């Protein structure tokens, strides 16, 4: 999803450095697990596009042995919680009922 070949990506309040695997949100570094980083990076790089849990799962998970899409819900929830620490009033990851998730434009 985001790899070292990508340069620094700046999108709205986000600055992503794939080489260092860091994301800054309103100039605050957000400490993310690898999975959280990859999910947020996927959504940010494809802003406005809706991804189903299944699509997110297969984009960021190395293993295809079991389909545990609930982990995507948990990961999204953790990312939201971390972002809300800095801007509780803003909702960047939007849930599209019955479809999946996207980053608001």
Image (cartoon, rainbow, N blue to C red):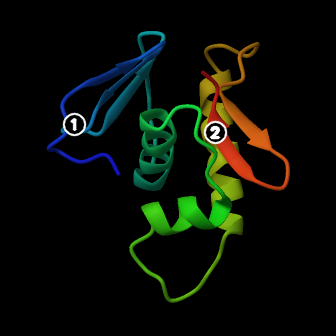
Does 60 sit above or below residue 104? Answer: below
**83 up-or-down from 5: above or below:** above
Image position of 105 (left or right of 58): right
Where residue 30 sits in the image (x, y, percent)? 46, 28
Which residue in the rendered view is the most extreme toward the left?
5
- Pick the front one: 59 or 86: 59
- Residue count near mark 1 (Cα–Cα under 10 Å), binned few <14, some 14–19, many ≥20: few
Q: Do the residues labelled 1 and 2 touch (CB within 8 Å)?
A: no
Look at the numbered disc 1 and give the secondary structure of its residue. loop
**Disc marking residue 65:** none
Q: Which of 55 and 37 is in front in this view?
A: 55
In this rendering, position of residue 28 left or right of residue 99? left
Against 56, residue 58 (above or below) is: below
The image quadrant where one finds the C terminus is top right
Query: Separation of disc 1 and disc 2 at Cα?
Result: 24 Å
Name the residue at 72% across, 51% down: 100
Mark sitting earlier along the chain (1/2): 1
Say which residue appears at 64% left-offset and 45% top-offset: 50
The residue lying at 66 percent from left, 61 percent from top is 53
**Element class at badge 2:** strand
Q: In which quarter of the image is residue 86?
A: top right
Residue linked to disc 1: 20
User: In the image, 68: left or right of 39?
Assistant: right
- Mark 2, Cα crowd under 10 Å, few <14 / some 14-19 / many 20+, is many
Asked if 73 appears above or below 4 in the picture, the reply is: below
Which residue is rendered at x = 32% and y = 33% of the image? 22
**Is 10 placed left or right of 88 in the picture?**
left
Q: Which residue lies furthest to the bottom in this view?
A: 65
Labels in figure, total: 2
At which x and y percent is residue 94? 72, 34
Image mark for residue 102: 2
Q: Residue furthest front?
A: 49
């Amino acid at each position: 999803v985001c790899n070292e070949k990508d340069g620094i990506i700046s999108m709205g309040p986000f600055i992503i450095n794939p080489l260092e695997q860091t994301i800054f949100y309103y100039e605050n570094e957000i400490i993310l697990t690898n999975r959280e980083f990859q999910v947020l990076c996927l959504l940010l790089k494809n802003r406005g596009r809706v991804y189903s849990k299944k699509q997110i799962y297969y984009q960021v998970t190395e293993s295809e042995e079991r389909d545990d899409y609930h982990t995507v819900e948990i990961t999204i929830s953790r990312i939201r919680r971390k972002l809300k620490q800095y801007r509780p009033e803003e909702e960047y990851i939007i849930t599209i009922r019955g479809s999946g998730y996207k980053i608001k434009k």
